[in-house]
Amino acid sequence: MATQVWINGQYFDKLDAKISVYDHGLLYGDGIFEGLRVYSSKVFKLQEHIDRLYDSAKSIALKIPIPPADLLKAVEDAVAHNKKVDGYIRLIVTRGAGSLGLDPRKCEPNIIIIVDDIVLYPKELYEAGLEVITSSYIRNHPNATNPRVKSLNYLNNILAKIEAIRAGCLEAIMLNHKGEVAECTGDNLFVIKKGILRTPPADAGILEGITRNFVIDLARHAGVPFQEANLTRHDVYVADEIFLTGTAAEVIAVTKVDDRVIGDGKQGPITARLRGLFTKAIRE
Ligand code: PMP
């Protein structure tokens, strides 16, 4: 069976799953989204993703036309309908179709649930680690669209991603408007120095990642010393270990940043331990 996409309560074959070209999601990037994982037929951290989606909606003054509990059920239904065992879900709410102006008042939001697959990085890089650069594009200023809103406006991140690809890398570190480390284009960043795990706080201009929060919990339970801390590029360069977290990326080591080898250039022991705990937990 071809992938069936849920749009506003109805299923459509992937190729027939369409919305209006007047949708402000397309015209202006006016909308929000979530990326979720399905492991062993169960949606990982579904409630957390639903909560973040409704927070994103509230922040951009978009009223999702159904209650959170109904949307949560719709996501589960779409997974069952597609008989998905392991996969990736893209949940999108657009402002909806309106006129050719910014005014959103005539728009009726569209809700879309795509149950499919994702491969962000080649499998071998999960052993070898990633090489990344620091981007010249900053993450959104918190007084613009706050990075905590998972909005359909990813242009800064896309430009940073293009910069990374042009430099022969698959990811880029993005700094905030103060020049501190924020996150990568689609992942949160952690460093380890002298056994202490650190990651930038939510107000450093990051998406407060659900995988980030889960890995922090795993680290705490495992007795790994942890701090939320503002980081500079220097902290990144001299780290013993670095790893990234994200729903699509899961947990992946970074072994080179701007041509500086991190630690001994291999996935470090704390990263390996946390990655092991993560891999185990998602199957429970
Ligand atoms: N930062 C950004 C910019 C992201 O787009 C994402 C999600 N792809 C993340 C961090 C990781 O968040 P999560 O763990 O909730 O997927």
Image (cartoon, rainbow, N blue to C red):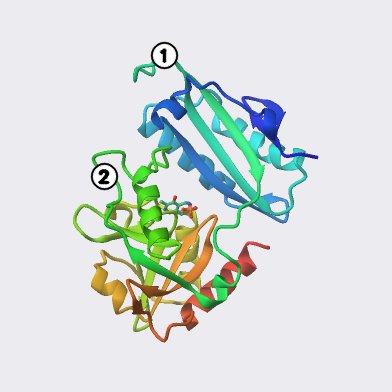
Residue identified by numbered label 2:
142
Which residue is more in the foreground, 83 or 46?
83
Identify whether 250 is placed above or below 160.
Answer: below
Q: Quadrant of residue 86?
A: bottom right
Identify whether 98 is placed above or below 260.
Answer: above
In the rendering, at what x and y percent does residue 17 appear? Answer: 65, 29
Ligand 1 within 8 Å, label 2 CB = no
In which quadrant will I find the C terminus? Answer: bottom right
Identify whether 152 is placed above or below 239.
Answer: above
Q: CA distance from mark 1 to mark 2?
A: 29 Å
Q: Quadrant of residue 19?
A: top right
Instruction: Check contact, mark 1 vs mark 2: CB within 8 A.
Output: no
Total marks placed: 2
Query: Which mark identifies residue 245?
Result: none
In the rendering, at what x and y percent does residue 211 appear? Answer: 50, 58
Identify whether 113 is placed above or below 24.
Answer: below
Q: Badge 2 local density, few (<14 within 10 Å), some, or many (20+)?
A: some
The first of marks 1 and 2 along the sequence is 1
Does 1 sit left or right of 52 as displayed? right
Does 101 sit left or right of 230 as displayed? right
Farthest residue, direction bottom? 264
Q: Badge 1 local density, few (<14 within 10 Å), some, or many (20+)?
A: some
Q: Secondary structure at mark 2?
A: loop
Q: Amino acid at mark 2?
A: Pro
In the rendering, at what x and y percent does residue 217 appear? Answer: 48, 64
Residue identified by numbered label 1:
99
Q: Amino acid at mark 1?
A: Ser
